[in-house]
């Protein structure tokens, strides 16, 4: 670690010491129909060497909030406010040129679909080397050597030959590996993976997730993984952030969130995916209705039109008042946004017997 | 019944939870596929385009779909599962093999002969955005089959369309809207309504939920279960999501490079998988319950990619990635051997994880020695082939034919 880096780390100590700290992030898109509140007051932190999983349906604002970290909304009419502290520096206050210098070097992103994220006219090696040469003054030859080294590191066979291939000559899994090589070539401190395995087969997905974990250990980077697959979150993430309609609805350590969830939306997500192991008597219970429009989100708790448990809240609190992100019954750092007074008891008594009858039997024994 | 489309999407039937589908494993088959093959020619470049090879997309596949039953077809992309679905709906004409629907071979029928059959076999496509014509209203999309097959007089079509919309949980008054006015899950419901229009006996569902959000997936799966119960439809359910297939299909076939490597009832495949590929697939699925212990699940690691179907490996096609492959696997192709009342597996060393036998179980049956070279002294056994399960099967414990 260089001395300048040490200084910035020291400076960031007053920001709870996290490598990435997002505070009250707001991303609004003004359109002719009104303001789309894609992200509305989002806060989270990620330490180096740790992984945060962001879960939510399409349109919940999970990708928008992450591209804000990379400054991808600059030059559009998006209204971004709040704080994004990366190693103590607020990325939102930086100038475009300064941001450009950090993008790819301090923060890198892996996109969902590598076929559309890569340029079809340039070779894979050319595109990876470009990412390296932008941030390092090296010769073409040195950049090419570094590219081959990275391709080898992410497990592409014959990297010295494949470096001259075009993206279409790679298989889906190999393209995703090449994307990972491209994003890691500058050794970034923060890696954002936006649905990195959604387009892949399960066996390839397992390989890619293995690779991400190995590389994280090696480079000690912070990872934000955006996904809708709770299984991926369970195996990869240290912390989980569940998003709904642009807001965090539940946030805490993975084990807490997936074993003792306290927000009906998280219950709904858990009950609407079947399992490959366990009881076949487990029920598949969908969340009724559709995700809300961010143009005109529901009043009060944004989840109330789809919530099966809103009758447990006295009065019409769910319709009128947005619940705060409050500590969960279990305590710790687990927080949830819900009016229900005893969500832990409701979960054990009503939700768990339906979705995992075998687990309930086990506990009773 | 008034339905407000913008806030809620009431689906009268599919809101309460559904347990996994059970089915009668002795029901007669509605569809019986035997030795199905589909070779796509590969042409050389240049003016004279000669055929230089074939993509063996489906290479000798046999299975049955039972009445009221549901067979899941799983495998990685490029294994031929979608091609199989398109062969059964006869969107392709198979290179070889039989497709018996209600006892009649439909593999060689002409387009004209197929027309009445299209009523009985329908398809649900993966991507509802591209499988619905954006220039047609929902009413004309769902009503088209009725008009083409002259089932109803024109003035009665609208009533039937509205009825169908209501069945799949959409507002019947929205028949004159266009596909883009609906959300992804609603569009998939339109695709389902169109497939239901002619009251088919068999529905081929090709990845019907993989393009949808998690919460919407469950809605559509429950809807399909309700429809199956109500109208007695048999399903060929093609998907890569093993958890959804486990929930929806009492019987499952696992494909690899154009061949079925393991087929059987739900319990045999998910509880006692005997093929190393099935085991690897199952162990690769990330599990939510893993959260209680943290870290990654123990699993079988497959390296590399699926080989090209133009030039598949000799012998067993999985051997290049198989953790337990031996010499015999490169030389002799393993037969799809029945090892239980409703369980078949194509492997020389079938066994549950960690319990694979030391010597190939198939050598004596095939008349070869343990290394795959033909053995003059051995007498090959006639093995039952074909799409159905026999009453006798090969007992893996004492390596004899088991007769109950």
Image (cartoon, grey):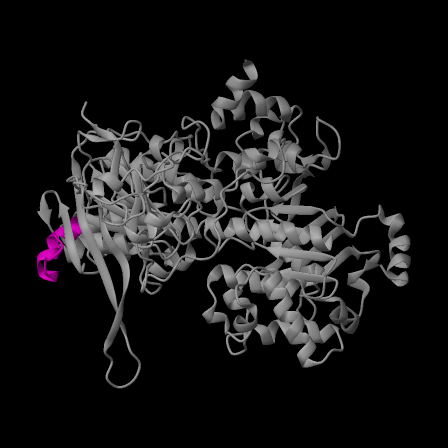
Determine whether B114 is above or below A304 in the image: below
Query: Magenta segment range?
Result: B106-119
What residue do we see at 81% from left, 64% from top? A93
Instruction: Mark yes or no: residue B15 visible.
Output: yes
Instruction: Mark yes or no: residue B25 visible.
Output: no
Q: Which quadrant would residue B273 be assigned to in this image?
A: top left
As drawn, which residue projects farthest toward the front? B377
Q: Would you say A89 lies left or right of B57 here?
A: right
- In x, y percent, where is residue B34? 17, 47
Magenta region, main secondary structure: helix
Camera-side residue of A322 and B212: B212
Camera-side residue of B105 and A331: B105
Q: Which quadrant would residue A76 be assigned to in this image?
A: bottom right
- In x, y percent, where is residue A105? 73, 66
Residue B113 within the magenta-colored segment of the rendering: yes
- In x, y percent, where is residue A212? 62, 53
Q: Quadrant of the C terminus of chain A?
A: top right
Residue B88 within the magenta-colored segment of the rendering: no
Q: Quadrant of the N terminus of chain A?
A: bottom right
Camera-side residue of A27 and A142: A142
Q: Which quadrant would residue A346 be assigned to in this image?
A: top right
Determine whether B143 is above or below B241 in the image: below
As drawn, which residue projects farthest toward the bottom? B47
């Amino acid at each position: 670690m260089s001395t300048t880096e040490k200084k910035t780390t020291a400076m960031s100590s007053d920001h709870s010491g996290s490598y990435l700290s997002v505070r009250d992030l707001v991303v609004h898109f003004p359109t002719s129909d009104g303001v789309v509140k894609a992200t509305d007051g989002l806060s989270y932190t990620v330490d180096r060497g740790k992984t945060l999983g962001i879960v939510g349906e399409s349109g919940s604002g999970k990708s928008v909030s992450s591209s804000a970290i990379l400054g991808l909304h600059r030059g559009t009419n998006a209204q971004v406010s709040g704080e994004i502290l990366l190693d103590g520096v607020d990325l939102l206050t930086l100038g475009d040129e300064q941001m450009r210098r950090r993008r790819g070097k301090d923060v890198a992103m892996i996109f969902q679909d590598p076929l559309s994220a890569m340029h079809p006219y340039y070779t894979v090696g050319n595109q990876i080397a470009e990412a390296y040469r932008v941030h390092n003054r090296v010769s073409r030859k040195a950049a090419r050597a570094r590219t081959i080294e990275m391709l080898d590191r992410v497990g592409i066979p014959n990297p010295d030959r494949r470096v001259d291939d075009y993206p279409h000559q790679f298989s889906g899994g190999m393209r995703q590996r090449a994307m990972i090589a491209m994003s890691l070539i500058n050794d970034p401190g923060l890696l954002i993976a936006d649905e990195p395995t959604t387009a892949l087969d399960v066996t390839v997905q397992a390989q890619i997730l293995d690779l991400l974990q190995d590389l994280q250990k090696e480079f000690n980077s912070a990872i934000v993984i955006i996904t809708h697959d709770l299984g991926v979150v369970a195996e990869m993430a240290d912390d989980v952030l569940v998003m709904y309609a642009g807001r965090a609805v539940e946030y805490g350590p993975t084990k807490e969130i997936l074993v003792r969830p306290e927000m009906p939306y998280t219950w709904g997500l858990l009950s609407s995916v079947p399992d490959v192991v366990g009881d076949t008597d487990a029920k598949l219970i969908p969340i009724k209705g559709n995700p809300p429009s961010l143009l005109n989100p529901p009043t009060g708790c944004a989840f109330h039109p789809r919530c099966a448990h809103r009758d447990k809240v006295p009065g019409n609190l769910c319709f009128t008042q947005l619940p705060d992100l409050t500590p969960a019954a279990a305590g710790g750092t687990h927080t949830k946004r819900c009016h229900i007074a005893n969500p832990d008891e409701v979960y054990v008594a009503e939700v768990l017997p339906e979705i995992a009858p075998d687990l309930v039997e086990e506990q009773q024994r | 019944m008034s339905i407000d489309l913008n806030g809620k999407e009431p689906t009268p039937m599919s809101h309460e939870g559904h347990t996994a589908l059970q089915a009668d494993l002795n029901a007669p088959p509605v569809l019986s596929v035997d030795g199905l093959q589909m070779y796509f020619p590969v042409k050389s470049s240049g003016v004279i385009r000669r055929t230089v090879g074939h993509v063996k997309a489906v290479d000798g596949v046999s299975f049955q779909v039972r009445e009221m039953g549901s067979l899941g077809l799983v495998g990685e992309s490029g294994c031929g599962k979608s091609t199989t679905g398109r062969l059964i709906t006869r969107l392709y004409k198979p290179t070889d093999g039989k497709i018996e629907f209600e006892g009649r071979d439909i593999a060689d029928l002409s387009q004209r002969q197929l027309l009445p059959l299209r009523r009985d076999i329908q398809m649900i496509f993966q991507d509802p955005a591209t499988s619905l014509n954006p220039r047609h209203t929902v009413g004309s999309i769902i009503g088209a089959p009725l008009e083409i097959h002259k089932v109803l007089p024109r003035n009665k079509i609208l009533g039937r369309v509205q009825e169908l919309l209501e069945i799949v949980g959409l507002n019947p008054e929205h028949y004159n809207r266009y596909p883009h006015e609906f959300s992804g899950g609603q569009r998939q419901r339109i695709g389902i309504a169109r497939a239901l229009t002619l009251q088919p006996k068999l529905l081929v569902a090709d990845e019907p939920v993989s393009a949808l959000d998690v919460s919407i997936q469950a809605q559509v799966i429950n809807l399909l279960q309700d429809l199956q119960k109500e109208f007695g439809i048999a399903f060929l359910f093609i998907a890569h999501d093993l958890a959804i297939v486990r929930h929806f299909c009492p019987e499952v076939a696992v494909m690899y490079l154009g061949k079925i490597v393991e087929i059987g009832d739900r319990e045999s495949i998910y509880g006692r998988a005997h093929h190393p590929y099935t085991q690897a697939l199952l162990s690769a699925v990330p599990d939510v319950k893993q959260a209680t212990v943290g870290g990654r699940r123990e699993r079988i690691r497959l390296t590399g990619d699926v080989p090209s179907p133009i030039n598949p490996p000799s012998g067993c096609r999985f051997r290049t990635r198989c953790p337990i492959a031996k010499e015999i696997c490169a030389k002799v192709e393993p037969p799809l051997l029945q090892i239980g009342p409703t369980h078949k597996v194509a492997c020389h060393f079938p066994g549950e994880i960690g319990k694979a036998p030391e010597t190939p179980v198939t050598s004596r049956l095939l008349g070869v020695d343990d290394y795959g070279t033909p053995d003059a002294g051995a007498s090959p056994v006639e093995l039952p082939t074909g799409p159905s399960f026999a009453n006798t099967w090969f007992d893996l414990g004492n390596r004899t034919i088991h007769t109950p």
